[in-house]
Image (cartoon, grey):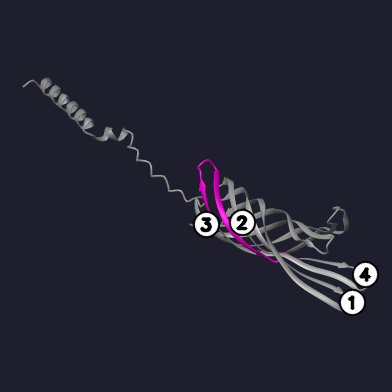
Amino acid sequence: MNTEAVKLALTSLAFVTAATSAHAGGPAAADAEPELAAPAAALASNSIWSGFWIGASMGSGSSAYDIGAHITDVDTGDMLGGLDLPDLGGKGGLIGAEIGWGHEFGNGWVAGAQLDYTSTQIKADAALNLGPTGTISTTFRPKFVASGLLRLGYVVNDSTMIYGLAGESYSTFHGDAEAGYGPDLATATYGFGAFGTTIGAGIETRLGEMTSLKLEYRATDFGDVGLIAGPISDTAQFDAAMATSSQSVRATLALHF
């Protein structure tokens, strides 16, 4: 056999073997780009702004009262006498409880509603000197406030929301009065209920997996409320009325579900 022919056959065999190995995934396959792993599934949202919550509140508040009393002539309507006590005010603490529900829309906005009950110690004291021997004194306060409120908020970052609220409130007011003239002393208690419009604003910050802290301001206007109206003689009518409003600042610890 021709020596040159043998060499040519061996060379051809080596070339074919190398090409076959590269096609089958040999050393040349190491240059191929690695296969990309499938992306991990997105983590489930852990937002606390959607769903129910309950909360407990503490804070302080103030109240303002404009009280007026007048005696008028039944026949002519002329005022025979009157007394006005503008801007009579009181301050005190408050505690409360609330339950609410909210929904986060995904674009930063959160809407919801809540019901709450607040017990107050916001007392207003007043005294009137009627002369050397006559005095009138009174203590007045709202005993509780129940509110139904709508809330609209905006999530500014992963843990904080600012919001405004508005709705209706109902309060019961209670008073004690003393009137003295010389050695004689008369005492009385009185009370009434009134509806009012409440507005407010606050900020809520997430503390943990299911808890948050709210700092909130509220103002309520109860309007004009009649206290007493009736005749005191055949020709005279006595009327007493009050315009009242309140403000409060509270901190609420909330648990979300």
Q: What span is colored magenta in the figure?
A: 101-123
Left or right of residue 81, residue 5 in this image? left
Disc 3: which residue:
53
Badge 1 crowding class, 10 Å Cα cut-off, few under 14, some 14 to 19, many 20 or more, is few
Residue at 52% from the left image edge and 57% from the top image edge:
53
Mark closer to the chain start, 2 or 1: 2
In the picture shown, does residue 43 fall above or below 33? below
- Tell which of 138 and 105 is nearer to you: 138
**Which amino acid does the dot numbered 2 rest on?**
Ser
Q: Nearer the viewer, mark 2 or mark 3?
A: 2
Q: Residues within 10 Å of mark 3 (few under 14, many from 20)?
A: many
Q: Is residue 18 left or right of residue 144?
A: left
x and y percentages locating residue 243 in the rendered image: 76, 55
In terms of image quadrants, where is residue 71? Answer: bottom right
Q: Quadrant of residue 29?
A: top left
Disc 2: which residue? 147
- Looking at the rendered structure, the kind of residue marked 1 is Gly
Q: CA distance from mark 2 to mark 3?
A: 16 Å
Task: Find out whether the residues at labels 3 and 4 contact each other: C-beta distance under 8 Å.
Answer: no
Q: Is residue 74 above or below residue 9?
A: below
In terms of secondary structure, where does tag 4 sit? loop
Q: CA distance from mark 1 to mark 4?
A: 10 Å
Circle nearer the viewer, 4 or 2? 4
